[in-house]
Each structure stands twice: as structure tokens, then as C-alpha cells.
């Protein structure tokens, strides 16, 4: 049976205030799925897995962080939470806030929010406000309003978000028996890569389970950590990582400096190809979530990475159902309902 969520399961390892009032939607315990066929295609000789975080209650890893942030805010007496979001944080904040009996306000950027995420925020009862600006503009605004009014900020600059999200690293170690050699992960606002680094390092301190190297992957149209400066108008089909000024960017660079690895960029074509490839192994993820695999494929193709004998985990951050509109498809064939026509169509 699924546990009552990550806060109960890992409570003693989480740095949360005593006033935290634990809620749960059964988040966490997401599968670590071997993808040996893809490993073979990439030359073989290593073990490759997907940590499929898209199977969380609202369909993304944001739930691991949000359950912690909202539980803390609830215990602190907040009545309302607010976040800026490219979509998944909004859906997650909306679900956990309503679960806790609180209100959620979500700020989304102009245009390009995947439909599944927007609809989720609305159906969970959040107040959705679209601003004429980017995610980065939205984040600035929510920081300002929470300084002035008693509204809890639940973006990943809220430290409790990372406390929750780091449990995904605990889960990977529990699933593999030790840390992998390499973790490939999409990077947007750069909260998650930091959360994983915290989680692996904490477990290593307790149980000597190791810390992986990190391959952080940005989209080439939104790659401030690769080009070394803020991107004013970030652009990519991977909307969840369409961020030009990552709040935890400096810390992310520090993660790869300390533990090894690097942050690279892949273009939209490479992201969509990786998404397709994962889907053909039965794992449909949203475009941003395929960036980790796209980055690994690119590094191997360009012979920049020695993978022989290694254990590699790709973090797939969100579910493909979130963003069906990005998939190009032909209309299904339409036939008369007779055996004859069916035989014609399938044989
Ligand atoms: C939020 C998000 C990311 C980026 O995570 P950061 O912590 O902002 O780096 C990647 N993929 C998906 C699906 C997301 O929702």
C-alpha cells in the first residue's frame, strides 16, 4: 500500500519547523523504471533508469516540495498561499492549498502555459492571474506582495520546498541501494537540482551511499546557466523550464562544481526527440521532462561523457498528459464498423 506521503515517511530527516501541520495526497514513492533498450541504443554497457516523478498526485515533482511548503504554511497560520508558475507549481499549490483548507493564488506568464496545468489550477479552485510578462516578472511580483501582506510564498525560494523535494533523492538511493553515478535533470528555476544534491549528500552523511555527478539540462532558448547571463526573453517549447533568470542558478552551478558534472543546453528538436523515444518505451513525459535524456543523448553522441559501467538516473519531472497539444499527430483512421473494414485496416 502507498504510504501516507513523504512527510510522514521521512519526517526525521526533514528540516521542518515543529509547527508544521502535515497534510498529504499520497505523494512520493514514484517508480524507478529501467530503460535498457535506450541504453543499448546509446552504446550499452551501462544501467539507465527513469525516476518518473510525473506519477505524483498532480502529475509533477512539484508535489514533493509543495506538500512540505503548504504543511509549514498551514501550521504557521497562513490562510493563503501564492506562487509564480510556468504551470506545474500552480497546479500543485492549488491542490495542496485546497486540501489544507487554504486559498491559492497563482501567477502565470503571458501565453504558453500548457493547457493541462492551467485547467488543473482552475479545477482545484485557485485564483489564476495571468500577467503581461515572463515567469521571472511573475516571481518578482509574488516576492514583493508576500513581503507586504500575510500571504505565504510557495515558490522554490521557500526553503521547505527543497526539504520536500530532496526526498526524491532518498527514494532513488532506497530503490538502487546506493546513489547512481550520474543524475540527469532538467533545470529551470534550479530548485530541483539543488534539492537532489541536498538529499544525496544528507543520505551519504548518514549511510555512506554516495553522491552522483549531475548533468543539468536547460533548453537552448532559455539557458542562462550555460551562456552565463540572464535571458530576457526565454523561448522554448519546454514551458516548464522557460526561465531566463533562475532563482537558484548560482547554487546550481555550485552543485556541479562541488559534486562534478555540468550544465548544458539542448535545443527543442532534441527535447522532442527524447520525448518521443521515452514514449516509445511506454513513458510519456512532458517536453521539459525529456530534457535530461536529451542532454544525456547529446553528451554520449558528442563523446563528452564516459558512461561505461555506470548507473545513470534520468529525472522525468512531469507527466505527458499535462501538455498534449505539443504532440503532432495525424487523425486516427475512421472506418465503417464491419469486420471486413477492420481486416482491411489492420492486416
Ligand atoms: C518546475 C519544473 C522543472 C524545473 O525545475 P526547477 O526546480 O525549476 O529547476 C522541470 N520540469 C518540470 C516538469 C517542472 O514542472
Image (cartoon, rainbow, N blue to C red):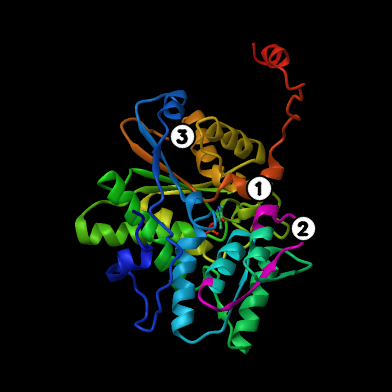
- Residue at image coords 69%, 38%: 327
User: What element does badge 3 sit on?
Assistant: loop
- Compared across the picture, whether 42 is left or right of 120 comes to left
Is the residue 217 above or below the residue 148 in the image? above
Q: Identify the magenta region.
A: 99-117
Q: Which mark is residue 304?
A: 3
- Compared across the picture, whether 281 is left or right of 242 comes to left
Is residue 8 in the magenta section? Answer: no
Q: Which mark is residue 323?
A: 1
Closer to viewer: mark 2 or mark 1: 1
**Residue 125 visible here:** yes
Q: Where does ligand 1 appear, by image quarter? A: bottom right
User: Image quadrant for the C terminus?
Assistant: top right
Closer to viewer: mark 3 or mark 1: 1
Is residue 108 in the magenta section? Answer: yes
Is the residue 147 above or below the residue 49 in the image? below
Circle 3/circle 2 CB separation < 8 Å = no
At which x and y percent is residue 263?
50, 49
* Mark 3 or 1, nearer chain start: 3
Q: Quadrant of residue 312?
A: top left
Distance from disc 2 to disc 1, alpha carbons, whole Å, reads: 14 Å
At which x and y percent is residue 306?
38, 33
The residue where tag 2 is placed is 111
Establish whether ligand 1 lies closer than 8 Å to the Cβ of label 2.
no
Amino acid at each position: 500500500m502507498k504510504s501516507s506521503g513523504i512527510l510522514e515517511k521521512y519526517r526525521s530527516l526533514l528540516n521542518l519547523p515543529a509547527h508544521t501541520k502535515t497534510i498529504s495526497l499520497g505523494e512520493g514513492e514514484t517508480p524507478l523504471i529501467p530503460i535498457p533498450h535506450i541504453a543499448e541504443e546509446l552504446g550499452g554497457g551501462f544501467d539507465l533508469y527513469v525516476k518518473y516523478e510525473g506519477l505524483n498526485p498532480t502529475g509533477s515533482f512539484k508535489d514533493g516540495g509543495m506538500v512540505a511548503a503548504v504543511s509549514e504554511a498551514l501550521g504557521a497560520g497562513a490562510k493563503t498561499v501564492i506562487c509564480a508558475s510556468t504551470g506545474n507549481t500552480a497546479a500543485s499549490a492549488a491542490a495542496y492549498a485546497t486540501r489544507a483548507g487554504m486559498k491559492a493564488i497563482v501567477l502565470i506568464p503571458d501565453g504558453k502555459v500548457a493547457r493541462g496545468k492551467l485547467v488543473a489550477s482552475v479545477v482545484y479552485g485557485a485564483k489564476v492571474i495571468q500577467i503581461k510578462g515572463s515567469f521571472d516578472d511573475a516571481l518578482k511580483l509574488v516576492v514583493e506582495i508576500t513581503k507586504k501582506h500575510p500571504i505565504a510564498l510557495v515558490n522554490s525560494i521557500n526553503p521547505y520546498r527543497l526539504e520536500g523535494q530532496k526526498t526524491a533523492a532518498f527514494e532513488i538511493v532506497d530503490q538502487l541501494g546506493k546513489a547512481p553515478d550520474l543524475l540527469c535533470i532538467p533545470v529551470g528555476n534550479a530548485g530541483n537540482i539543488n534539492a537532489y544534491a541536498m538529499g544525496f549528500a544528507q543520505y551519504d552523511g548518514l549511510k555512506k551511499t554516495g553522491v552522483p555527478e549531475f548533468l543539468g539540462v536547460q533548453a537552448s532558448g532559455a539557458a542562462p546557466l550555460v551562456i552565463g547571463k540572464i535571458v530576457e526573453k526565454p523561448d522554448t517549447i519546454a514551458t516548464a523550464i522557460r526561465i531566463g533568470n533562475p532563482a537558484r542558478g548560482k547554487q546550481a552551478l555550485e552543485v556541479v562544481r562541488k559534486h562534478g558534472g555540468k550544465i548544458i543546453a539542448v535545443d527543442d528538436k532534441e527535447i522532442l526527440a527524447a520525448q518521443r523515444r521515452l514514449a516509445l518505451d511506454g513513458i510519456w513525459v512532458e517536453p521539459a521532462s525529456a530534457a535530461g535524456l536529451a542532454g544525456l543523448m547529446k553528451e554520449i553522441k558528442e563523446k563528452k561523457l564516459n558512461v561505461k559501467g555506470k548507473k545513470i538516473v534520468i529525472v522525468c519531472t512531469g507527466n505527458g498528459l499535462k501538455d498534449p497539444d505539443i504532440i503532432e499527430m495525424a487523425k486516427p483512421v475512421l472506418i465503417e464498423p464491419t469486420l471486413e473494414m477492420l481486416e482491411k485496416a489492420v492486416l
